[in-house]
Image (spheres, rainbow, N blue to C red):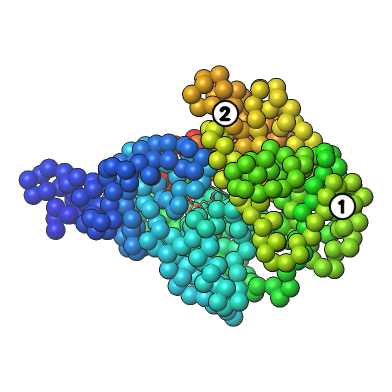
Amino acid sequence: MGAKKSGRRASGTAVPLSEELARMSGTQNVVSEGKRLEEYSEDMAGFRATPAVVVRPGSEEEVRKIVALAGRRRLPIVPRGAGSSLTGASVSKGAIILDMRRMDAVVKVDTVNWYVRAQAGITLEDLNKRLEKEGFFFPPDPASSSICTVGGAIAEGSGGLRCVKYGTVKDWVLSLRLVLPNGKAANFGEPLAKNRAGFDLVHLVVGSEGTLGVVTEACLKIIPIPGTQPKRLLLTFDDWRSASDAICQLRASKIMPHMFEFLDRETIQALNKNLGTSEDEAEATLIVDIEEPSLGAAMEIFKRNGPSKVVMAKDAKEAEAFYQIRSMAYLAIRGLGKAVQVEDIVVPIDRLGEYMMKVKETASKHGLRILVNGHAGDGNVHPVILYDEDDKRSRAAAFRAFEEICRYGISIGGSITGEHGVGTQKVKLLREQMQAHEGEEALRLMKEIKRIFDPKGIMNPGKYVEAA
Ligand SMILES: Cc1cc2nc3c(=O)[nH]c(=O)nc-3n(C[C@H](O)[C@H](O)[C@H](O)COP(=O)(O)OP(=O)(O)OC[C@H]3O[C@@H](n4cnc5c(N)ncnc54)[C@H](O)[C@@H]3O)c2cc1C
């Protein structure tokens, strides 16, 4: 017993880390070598770092013990869901990776107070399948919903296709349980429609990228599935100016789409090539969901801006096919077999057309291909820079292009991230944005907050705010 507590054997030698973790979570839930460890060495944008060990806890109690162990040994520890983030946030060299996906229970669906209490490891898709049975849904829908977890989506403050109407994950978290870096569990917030008791620590954790603690459970707001579905349209335009004029005029006329997405020609080409679609390869494609009463006015605006095609989905199957065009875009691009640098810049919506043209200019200046898709209704642009990993010059050009398009975004009042976060990828640019937008004091306070939560610096260290 004494040996277990102190992490030393009776002989005085240290118990190996994986052995100590196996005592807490079972041997079958510890991975310390081989191909399975390799799987945890990469995120879905290809950021790589090999951890020391992976452990898959089955309860909050186990999480507490594991975090306390990391504290005692002063080892880096990184909570992880599906590893689908795109910024290096979920990989860390020599760390204990805490794979949260065994903790995937829906604890309670409250159909009067309209919230769901769920463990952090459940995927958003499984959560919504469970809610559907009660006639409810959780609106935030990253394109990775089939794999990404509640904990990962909270820690990333994820967005998605329906944000334009429903907001991002941050708008839907009422309360959560967090295992702090000292191994204690804390309740933040209340599962209530209103709560003004104290500072809003819930929203400090949302978007904290696993640097403040481990989310084990959360109460998320839910709403009834709407009785009528909006109409889904697919439109194409021959130039970005017309497409962006249509986007701005729709907003100026106070029409609120449920979803408002865009893709460029090269992304459609990638979809046609790799996923067997046969969409028109127009300069700009928009996919938009509009409620029936606003449909006539919206159509008028779109037609005024000279679209080359306007199609309204004739049934649910076709509407789903339009949705898939957008949600499969990243996978289609990955299918081109090139290394990618995935971007996530937010610009004021009235500067979207200008920004698209800047991205294309930057691509040709550096002799690169930059494919672009994104959320028109949020001004959230996802340029995907393709480059050749084995060619030093191509790598350098991609990096320069990445910095230039981020800096241009900052210069027109935008942000370097709307939903993917900072991780290790955008540390320098986070600092630049804060400096450019008078956020230096805010950044100083953020660093202090990190130190208060994690004085030993063990929780997903060397990234995000701490590193900026
Ligand atoms: C094809 C594809 C499409 C995508 N589309 C979108 C999109 O539309 N919108 C969007 O916002 N993002 C999108 N993403 C990015 C990514 O899927 C989201 O950020 C997602 O929410 C991450 O969830 P995850 O479970 O995979 O977290 P991980 O990648 O495992 O972790 C992400 C971060 O969260 C932390 N973390 C994970 N679990 C916990 C926990 N329980 N407690 C504390 N911290 C934790 C990790 O330490 C890490 O910092 C996409 C990614 C891919 C590959």
The quadrant the N terminus occupies is: bottom left
What residue do we see at 28% from left, 52% from top?
Answer: 30
Q: Where is mark 2, residue-wise?
A: 387
Q: Amino acid at mark 1?
A: Phe
The residue type indicated by label 2 comes to: Tyr
State the residue in front, 135 or 368. Answer: 368
The answer to whether one can see residue 452 in this image is no
* Residue at image location 19% in from the left, 45% down from the top: 16
Spot occupied by residue 253 in the image (x, y as percentages of width and height): 88, 56
Residue 196 to residue 415: above or below: below
Disc 1 crowd rating (10 Å Cα; few below 14, some 14-19, many 20+) is: many
Q: Is residue 109 visible?
A: yes
Q: Is mark 2 within 8 Å of ligand 1?
A: no
Q: Is 26 placed above or below 391 here?
A: below
Which badge, 1 or 2, is on the more N-terminal residue? 1
- Name the image quarter holding residue 114: bottom right
53 vs 433, nearest the viewer:
53
Q: Does residue 193 lie above or below 201 as drawn?
A: below
Label 2 crowd bin: few (<14), some (14–19), many (20+), radius 10 Å = many
Q: Name the residue at 38% across, 53% down.
A: 99
Determine which residue is flagged by label 1.
Answer: 302
Instruction: Tell me which residue sits at (74%, 27%) in the image.
Output: 361
